[in-house]
Amino acid sequence: MNFKNYTVFYVSVAILLALVITGAVVPNVLENATASAQSFITDSFGWYYLIVVTFFVIICLYLLISPVGKIKLGKNDDKPEFSRLAWLAMLFSAGMGIGLVFYGTAEPLSHYAISSPTGEVGTNQGMKDSMRYTFFHWGIHAWAVYGIVALSLAYATFRKGESTLISSTLRPILGNSMNRSPGKIVDIIAVIATVSGIATTLGFGAVQINGGLAYLYDIPTSFTTQFIIIAIVTVLFMLSALTGIGKGIKILSNTNMVIAFVLFLFVFLFGHTLFVLNLFTDTIGAYLQNLVRMSFRIAPLNAEDRQWINGWTIFYWAWWIAWSPFVGVFIARISKGRTIREFVTYVLFIPSIIGFLWFTVFGGNAMRMEHQGITNISSLATEESLFALLDQYPIGAILSIVAILLIGVFFITSADSGVFVLGMLSANGIQNPSNRIKVIWGILLTTMALVLLYSGGLQALQNTMIIAALPFSVIMILMTASLLKELHKEKEKGEKKRLGHTK
């Protein structure tokens, strides 16, 4: 590979290898450094995260109703490459995946029984508050972050003929400097943020598979077990990654949706079905009614509430931003031929509603059981909560095995999509990166996840991701400005052309 053409690849790999070596040799140093930096960012920039993510929501809603929504992400005669169902399956698997399974039971239960966002622990009101904030964390704010990056990339790539690079989207406002060092720096930041986000998710996946095995078969929860899990999954996702996006990723995404639907349907039908339907309906109303208040809630006068916001809301906003280069590139890649209005409608709302249903079914049933004294799932480790819930159902052991399979397939899909996207970002935006680059990124991703687990467990994963998200959030603001500038320029040209024909 020519160094000049692959500067982003070599520099990114060098930086990440330095982190990996530091974490392996002196894990305490890495853990302490990331913890200090994370604490400073959440305390000093929490307000910024809340404002910037809400800003992205407003921009997406504007594009939905604006006349520019008619513009196609591609040439006027381009057709979508994938069916709508396959498209939704792929974007949902890449965008939420392991996170939904990991937090589906644990987050609502934690807000209800352990630490409430409003102080109403263990009460009926606490149950409703818990679901409202869970919807908030996994709803349109998350998908607006993904949507902005994906829209900017898809428009620049398929409409304007640019390469699929983050730096290419900034050309309208920063000009040809994006061909030189500033552009390389932008792409390197995007790669570092992407690796941090994906490594965090892979760590969650390994920990939860370990939790399921520990709950079912008393296999010890340890770094050694997680190492073995990640090693096995690495082989599987690399085999999938080498088959390309049209085969491996598409097949796995569709498989994900089928397994997830079977598990969801069983828990829904054999749980407190009427309660779940009522809770879902009530929470949708509370979510919409309180959306503005929740979006800007920072608790400046209450240290305990602020700590909760830092640990949950700010963490999630950073997670979505860190994941956005990866998910954005991937969604852009599979969205050619869609109009902006269709894109925003499906990306912003459909996955949000699916997520809301998932959390209500799993979290709602867990809270109801705990409220009635049937079980005490909240006393267990986060990664074991799903399996403790499934244990309350008929054929619970079989359901738990299905859940482990689902996590494994989500794990493979996320990593598979991740190496594909990292290959694109680090190799001049080529649509189909070489197998050599994908293998290197696959090994580095899993090594990063292992080192972070080794140096500080889930907390080290979360800290690293929050740090990486901050610089990329600034790039996202510039991407938004560039996109709006280009869309309005195209709209004006279209109007002039139409008026010219009229005359």
Image: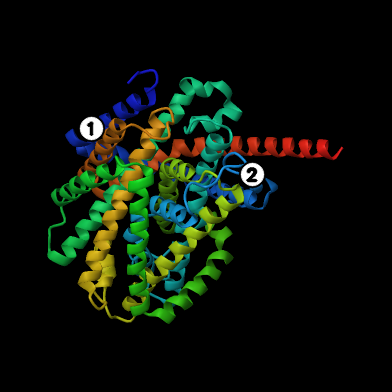
Total marks placed:
2
Which kind of residue does numbered mark 2 sit on? Answer: Ile
Residue 472: x and y, percent?
46, 37
Q: Residue at x 17, y 33 (%)?
A: 25
Q: Would you call the spot at circle 1 few (<14 residues within 10 Å), some (14-19), or many (20 or more)?
A: some
The answer to whether residue 302 of the structure is visible from this angle is: no
Under tag 1, what secondary structure?
A: helix
Label placed on residue 22 = 1
Nearest to the observer: residue 345 or residue 111: 345
Residue 125: x and y, percent?
46, 74
Nearest to the observer: residue 34 or residue 179: 179
Q: What residue occupies the far right of the structure in this picture?
A: 503
> In this figure, which residue is indicated by the disc labeled 2?
71
Q: Residue at x 29, y 51 (%)?
A: 411
The answer to whether residue 400 of the structure is visible from this angle is: yes
Residue 307: x and y, percent?
40, 54
